[in-house]
Image: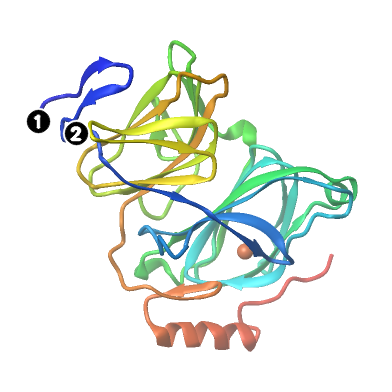
Amino acid sequence: MSKIIRMNEQNYLSSGKTRSISRVLNSDQTTEGEGFIVNRAFPTRHLSDLDPFLLLDEIGPKDLAPREAKGAPDHPHRGFETVTYMLEGKFEHKDSTGNAGKLGPGDVQWMTAGAGVVHSELPEKEFAQRGGLLHGFQLWVNLPKKDKMINPRYQDIPSLKIPVSKTADNLVMAKVIAGEALGVKAVIETRTPIMYIHFTLQPGASITQPVPKEYNVFVYVIGGQGLFGFDNKKQLANRGQIITFDNDGEEVEIRAASDTRAAFDVLLIAGKPLNESVARYGPFVMNKREEIMEAIADYQNGSMGKITPS
Ligand code: FE
């Protein structure tokens, strides 16, 4: 297959190697936990999931007044992973296996619920008192059938330990949370092959990220404006939108608009699909309905444990 031929900045010939865009969708505003507002990229009525991903929420961005911050008190999870990436503000978590910690700007928590945990995700006390800007993401990653009942695991990675890479011209920066980008590998371990990259592109810059053809991939726009696709299917995307791609190539092209001063800030998230049946009910994601009933019973009879007060 022929390589892409760059005609000029906004005119590409499709080659079959760069993926075509499938859809550009808006996120839905909804509430979570005690009532904090999130932009939900999916599941929505337009997009139920993107195997192996089950949910992506953008928390904020919201400038909170003192004591306005809300969180998600004690609740269970089984059968999947929750990945929290903070951009602004501070959260603290605690769980039934005895883990506790704080998450500040740039920090990532990759929580593998496996057989089950009960945890709380709350605004950090001082931050909640003081108020301030809150902004972050939570992604839900499904676990393969064989891993659904493994022991829970936490990977708490501070911002300083998240590998960062830049192009030689400094126009594109990548924070590599999972997978690999611009020659740099992530430190977080995933159960199945996942890519989670935070790209920041200066106006007019572009980046081509290799993504194996079988992976499902999407881009979520955090800020700025960009251009996706080529030929007769070229589309602009703005903050709060999600772009999905066809499985017709081995790379994804992201281009920042040039007629603006704002950087184009996006998450590129990709993963190898599990292609297994999904039974989901609230905080439990299993393969069969009976396993959901089991999860509810296990939670109710206390076998997922509880958070011991400090
Ligand atoms: Fe949770």
The amino acid sitting under disc 2 is Lys
Kind of element beneath mark 2: loop
Residue nearest the viewer, comparing 99 with 211: 211
User: Can residue 194 be seen from the camera position used here?
Assistant: no
Q: Earlier in the sequence, mark 2 or mark 1?
A: 1
The C terminus, quarter of image: bottom right
The response on whether ligand 1 sits within 8 Å of label 2 is no
Q: Position of residue 230 (x, y in %)?
A: 26, 31
Callout 2 environment at 10 Å: few (<14), some (14 to 19), or many (20+)?
some
Q: Looking at the picture, how far across and down is residue 254, in whole percent?
A: 38, 30
Left or right relative to 90: residue 42: left
Report if the CB atoms under discs 2 and 1 are less than 8 Å apart.
yes
- Distance from disc 2 to disc 1, alpha carbons, whole Å, reads 7 Å
Determine whether the residue tagged by mark 1 lies in a helix, strand or loop.
loop
* Along the line of sight, the residue nearer the viewer: 197 or 237: 237
Relative to residue 268, is residue 278 depicted above or below? below
Mark 1 lies on residue: 1
Q: Quadrant of ligand 1?
A: bottom right
Residue 207 can be seen in this image: yes
Q: Quadrant of residue 72?
A: bottom right
Q: Position of residue 239 (x, y in %)?
A: 54, 40
What colour scheme governs how the chains and residues are painted in the rendered image of this protein?
rainbow
Q: Is residue 101 above or below residue 222?
A: below
Q: Which residue is mark 2?
A: 17
Amino acid type indicated by mark 1: Met
